[in-house]
Image (cartoon, rainbow, N blue to C red):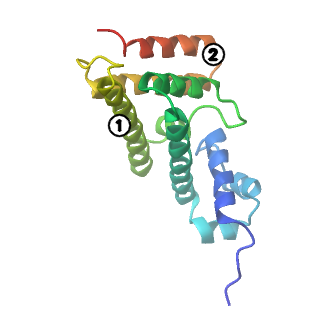
Amino acid sequence: MARSKEFDEHDVLLKAMRLFWEQGYEKTSLQDLVTHMGIHRRSLYDTFGDKHSLFVKAMEQYDKQTSAAIKAEVTRGRTSQEAIRFFFDYLIEVNDGRPLGCLYVNSATELALRDPEVGELTNEGFKNEERFLADLIRKGQQSGEIPLGKDADQLAASLQATMIGIRVLARTSTDRKKLHRLADASVAMLDAP
């Protein structure tokens, strides 16, 4: 007879996600995971597979959790430009005890070139974010808030590149004033003729 799990799979996955986010894939050992997740090594293998499989599941969970939350928060009662500005401010200012930066950006810089599965996940996450930004820009163009002559896809790619850079810089000693200046310059592109 199979034993029932003595832990909540979702909760321990969130713990693994946070540890990978804080330390990165390479620096996180199996023992770190077992200790941080509060489960036995055998339970980790039986539930999630190996370390890499757990990492992929943690990335997928991160995408589900953060994408929906950010999109809902960013668009809540805001015009397109306000939403984009809020998105930048959110990336710079949110300090709710989460690790610095972004699990996807961290994983892309650490692993994507040599791990095709991680590369595919990060690229898909970046494409989704870029599409979200392009949709906001098109909405702003339809409302007259953003000039129609601008290429929404190109603007979205530029905005996202700055957002990725901000996420990387957020992990360093870069001060927030500098990050806000970078955001201001990017948002100003939306108004320029």
Report the residue at 43% width, 42% height from top: 125
In this rendering, would 45 be left or right of 128?
right
Q: Above or below — where is 120 with respect to 156?
A: below
Q: State whether residue 181 appears in this view.
A: yes
User: Quadrant location of residue 91?
Assistant: top right
Q: Residues within 10 Å of mark 1 (few under 14, many from 20)?
A: some
Q: Which residue is mark 2?
A: 176
Q: Which residue is mark 1?
A: 131
> In x, y percent, where is residue 171?
62, 26
* Amino acid type for the residue under numbered disc 2: Arg
User: Quadrant location of residue 38?
Assistant: bottom right
Callout 1: helix, strand or loop? Answer: helix
Question: Closer to the observer: label 1 or label 2?
Answer: 1
Going from N to C along the chain, the mark reached first, 1 or 2, is 1
Q: CA distance from mark 1 to mark 2?
A: 26 Å
> In x, y percent, where is residue 135?
35, 34
> In x, y percent, where is residue 37?
72, 57
Report the residue at 66% width, 46% height from top: 18
In this rendering, would 7 be left or right of 125?
right
Q: Residue furthest bottom?
A: 1
In this rendering, would 146 be left or right of 43?
left
* Amino acid type for the residue under numbered disc 1: Arg
In this rendering, would 51 be left or right of 184?
right
